[in-house]
Amino acid sequence: MKWVYLLMALVGGVAVGIQAVVNGGLGKRIGVIEASFMSFLIGTVALFFIVIFFGKGNFLALSAVPKGQLIGGLLGAFYVFVMVMTVPKIGVTAAFFSIIAGQILISVIIDHFGLFGGQTYPLDAKKLTAILLMLGSIYLFNHK
């Protein structure tokens, strides 16, 4: 059963890769901020109908969640804005190398310190070496 979730994550990754180039092209035609807005507007409309027909959660529970958990939409909007701006300038692959590096770096910090209520997974020499190799690969990929 775990393979189903791995496959779903893989398909999600493919969707994000396509989203980057589609939104980047839209940004070149209508503007970076406008393309970011349209991406979220269309996504919001789609999610509205998904919630109406398939939703089983409870929006009333929002009042009880820690307020920091409500910034996901802002972070998502920032991510889409950055991708719309950078993909036409540096390409999909270079943008994703950097995005993934940022995700791994913040993940290491979150794990090392147990931020946001997570369990701690200390940084060690092997993990640090892997991070440095990743940063080196970004340099090599983008160096002319």
Image (tube, grey):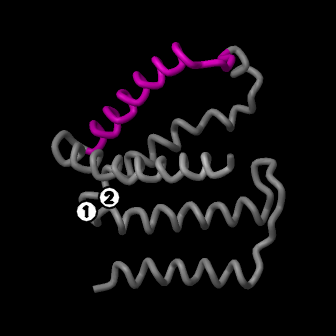
Q: Residues within 10 Å of mark 1 (few under 14, many from 20)?
A: few
Quadrant of the drawing holding the C terminus: bottom left
Residue stretch rendered in magenta on the structure: 32-59
Q: Secondary structure at mark 1?
A: helix
Give amino acid for label 2.
Answer: Thr
Q: Which residue is mark 2?
A: 86
Q: CA distance from mark 1 to mark 2?
A: 5 Å
Image-quadrant location for residue 40:
top left
The image position of residue 123, as x and y in percent, is 76, 74
Residue at 47% of width from left, 25% of height from top? 47
Q: Are marks 1 and 2 in contact (CB under 8 Å)?
A: yes
Give amino acid for label 1.
Answer: Lys
Q: Secondary structure at mark 2?
A: helix
Image-quadrant location for residue 142:
bottom left
Q: Which residue is mark 1?
A: 89
The image position of residue 79, as x and y in percent, is 45, 49
